[in-house]
């Protein structure tokens, strides 16, 4: 059970990491899309610090956060496999919950933000971030149980 959980956590880290480079925000009828990483490198939003924006009362996290969290989850999974210890599973659960929280905040900001769901909608990258975060929670739990 431990080995399966560690491999699942490894996959979760990859999902969270890769979701950063996929579409997070897409325009009407599929026109125009922005990835989480575009928010960092292209300065498409008012994200001045690279991590977070709270413009007009609508919080939004950039893809830099998910790159870091995905890399940490991936590193913890490799550490769990190499050291055969359970504690990296517990940390990966914590980081997965943080990533899940950021995904939920971003999706709710997109849906309730200016223009609402009529103007933009969540992209596949944010959906993959939610899925990867949930997989990370399950994988970390299996690491602890094994």
Image: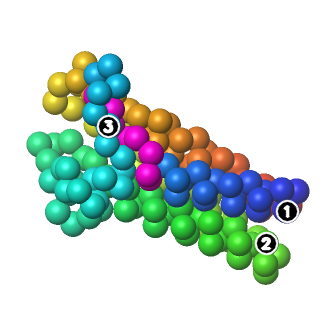
Residue 43 horizontal/vertical position (percent)? 19, 56
What is the spatial separation of the Cα atoms under label 1 and label 2, in whole angstroms? Answer: 7 Å
Magenta-tinted stretch: 20-27
Query: Mark 2 or mark 3, which is nearer the start of the sequence?
Result: 3
Please name the residue shown 41% across and 34% down the image. Answer: 123
SS type, badge 2: helix
Residue nearer the viewer, 107 or 101? 107
Are dots 1 and 2 in contact, CB under 8 Å? Answer: yes
Dot 1, crowdedness within 10 Å: few (<14), some or many (≥20)? Answer: some
Q: Residue 23 magenta-drawn? A: yes
Spatial separation of the CA atoms under disc 3 and disc 2: 37 Å
Residue farthest to the left? 56
Residue 3, numbered circle: 1
Q: Is residue 64 left or right of residue 97?
A: left
Q: Is residue 118 visible?
A: yes
What residue is rendered at 38% in x and 32% in y? Answer: 122
Residue at image mark 3: 33
Task: Give residue 81's mark.
Answer: 2
Residue drawn where x is 46% and y is 67% of the image: 68
Determine the residue positioned at 25% across, 47% down: 59
Res 64 → quadrant: bottom left
Q: Earlier in the sequence, mark 3 or mark 1?
A: 1
**Quick check: marks 3 and 2 in contact, CB under 8 Å?**
no
From this view, report whether residue 29 is shown above or below residue 4: above
Q: Quadrant of the C terminus?
A: bottom right
Q: Quadrant of residue 49?
A: bottom left
Count the marks. Answer: 3
Q: Quadrant for the N terminus, please.
A: bottom right
Q: Earlier in the sequence, mark 1 or mark 2?
A: 1
Q: Secondary structure at mark 3?
A: strand
Where disc 1 sits, the SS reads helix
């Amino acid at each position: 059970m431990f080995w399966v959980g560690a491999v699942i956590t490894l996959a979760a880290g990859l999902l969270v990491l890769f979701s950063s480079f996929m579409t997070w925000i897409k325009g009407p009828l599929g026109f125009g899309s922005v990835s989480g990483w575009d928010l960092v490198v292209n300065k498409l939003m008012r994200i001045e610090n690279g991590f977070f924006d709270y413009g007009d009362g609508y919080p939004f996290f950039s893809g830099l956060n998910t790159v870091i969290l995905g890399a940490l989850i991936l590193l913890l999974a490799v550490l769990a496999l190499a050291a055969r210890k359970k504690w990296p599973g517990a940390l990966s659960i914590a980081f997965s919950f943080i990533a899940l929280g950021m995904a939920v905040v971003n999706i709710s900001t997109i849906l309730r933000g200016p223009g609402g769901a009529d103007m933009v909608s969540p992209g596949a990258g944010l959906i993959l971030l939610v899925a990867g975060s949930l997989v990370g929670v399950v994988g970390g739990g299996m690491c602890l149980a094994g």
